[in-house]
Image (cartoon, grey):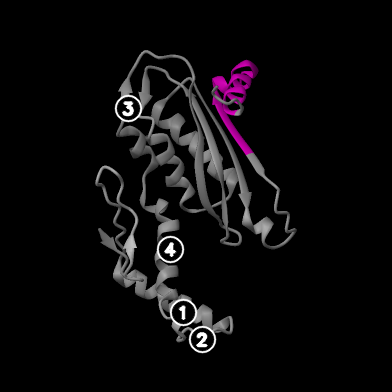
């Protein structure tokens, strides 16, 4: 069992197969970021020395490093690590992939789902790699429009498929918590390449991601 060094309580990251997730951080980077966040608390009128805030700067530093760890990942290498020759030529769809990212304009979260499809051209990729590519780009400071294009372009470049389709639906806390304060608004973006520019192919993709299995 792992213990969280912040709170000395069990970390529930052990799965049924006995695997554990351990986050490791650069101590010097954590110290540097913590100092900045401590100053931010002061400027906001808080007392960073009070009990409830003593470890808050360090916690924020670790959280921000985790939320932006996509900068340390190479999405194309993720795909190239699991490419397989396969004579399958129909659409492959992975839908309802959870997306968690940070808006680069206000550094507030946006979150939702990504739906991704490609038509193989002699190679398929391990299915788990597609959500990993989503995370690699989402765990950065982002705008949804760029995120959508980056996922499409990465899959297109790595697999060289007949085409790629990407649709992302997200709620943005910068719209819900501030500004226009529209809590129920959802932003949808799409990006296509190759065969997905054909209306029939695109319609099939959109039908598949909107339908439920019986």
Label 2 to label 4: alpha-carbon separation: 21 Å
Q: Which residues are magenta?
A: 189-209
The earlier-in-sequence mark between 4 and 3 is 4
Label 2 residue SS: loop
The earlier-in-sequence mark between 3 and 2 is 2
The main secondary structure of the magenta stretch is helix
For the residues bearing labels 2 and 1, Cβ distance under 8 angstroms: yes
Residue identifier under label 4: 63
Residue identifier under label 3: 83
Residue identifier under label 2: 47
Nearer to us: label 1 or label 3? 1
For the residues bearing labels 2 and 4, Cβ distance under 8 angstroms: no
Q: Is residue 103 above or below residue 38?
A: above
Label 4 residue SS: helix
Label 1 residue SS: helix
Q: Is residue 143 left or right of residue 1?
A: right
Label 2 to label 1: alpha-carbon separation: 8 Å
Image quarter hosting the C terminus: top right
């Amino acid at each position: 069992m792992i213990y969280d060094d912040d709170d000395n309580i069990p970390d529930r990251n052990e799965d049924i197969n006995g695997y554990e997730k351990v986050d490791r951080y650069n101590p010097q980077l954590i110290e540097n970021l913590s100092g900045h966040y401590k100053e931010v608390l002061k400027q906001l009128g808080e007392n960073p020395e009070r009990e409830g805030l003593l470890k808050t700067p360090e916690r924020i530093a670790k959280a921000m490093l985790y939320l932006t760890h996509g900068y340390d990942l190479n999405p194309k290498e993720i795909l190239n690590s699991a490419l397989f020759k396969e004579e399958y030529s129909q659409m492959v769809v992975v839908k309802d992939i959870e997306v968690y990212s940070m808006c680069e304009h206000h550094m507030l979260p946006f979150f939702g789902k990504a739906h991704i499809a490609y038509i193989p051209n002699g190679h398929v990729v391990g299915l788990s790699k597609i959500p990993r590519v989503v995370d690699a780009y989402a765990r950065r400071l982002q705008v949804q429009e760029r995120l959508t294009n980056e996922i499409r372009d990465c899959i297109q470049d790595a697999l060289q498929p007949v085409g790629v389709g990407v649709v992302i639906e997200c709620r943005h806390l910068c719209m819900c918590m501030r500004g226009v304060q529209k809590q129920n608004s959802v932003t949808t973006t799409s990006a296509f390449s190759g065969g997905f520019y054909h209306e029939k192919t695109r319609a099939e993709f959109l039908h598949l991601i909107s339908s439920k299995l019986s």
